[in-house]
Amino acid sequence: MYGIPYAAKSIVKIDPTKPATTSTIGEEAEKVFLCDNGVLGGGGYIYAANMYGQVLQIDTTSNKYDWIGVRIYSRYDAGLGDPIVGADKCCIYWPPFNTNRELKFDPETKQLPSLVVGGALGEESDK
């Protein structure tokens, strides 16, 4: 099990067969992660997004993490909802939470995360 941090600088790994043993993944971050829940994608990677629209990729094989993309949102309170694997079993979507568009990321192509094209879900308040 992996604990994806919101107000912490490390990702926690817990082995349920050895509950007294916990460890962290990768290097401690310079700033807090500001991520909410994650989802398991293909290849043993876990994906989460921070409130700025950057995608956190956790490699469960190498016990390392990387950030994908740059800040899409500049507001501190923007935020995204819990991730959902699309019906195509490929793309991951984060519904809006305090924003007006959903975030999309395709782990297979590794294209940068982007906002879903289409009508805005309300007034423009992303910036």
Image: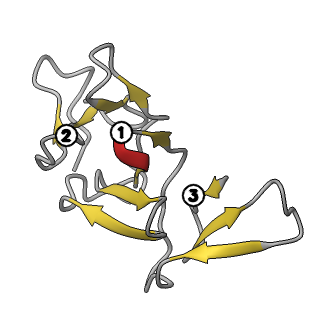
Numbered tag placed on residue 42 in the rendering: 1
Secondary-structure class at tag 1? helix
Q: Where's residue 103, x and y in %?
A: 26, 36
Q: Disc 2 to disc 1, how far (Cα)?
A: 8 Å
The residue at the point 43 percent across, 52 percent down is 77
Q: Earlier in the sequence, mark 3 or mark 2?
A: 3
Q: Quadrant of residue 21?
A: bottom right
Q: As shown in the figure, which amino acid type bears the numbered disc 3?
A: Ile
Residue name at image x 67 percent, y 52 percent: 1
N-terminal-most mark, 3 or 1 = 3
Above or below, 95 relative to 72? above
Mark 1 residue crowding within 10 angstroms, few (<14) / some (14–19) / many (20+): few
Q: Name the residue under label 3.
A: 4
Q: Residue 108 carries which label?
A: 2
For residue 74, side relative to residue 25 (left or right): left
In this rendering, the label closer to the viewer, 3 or 1:
1
Question: Residue 78 placed where, x, y %?
Answer: 37, 48
Distance (Cα) linking label 3 and label 2: 22 Å
Q: Which of marks 2 and 1 is nearer the N terminus?
A: 1
The type of residue carrying mark 1 is Gly
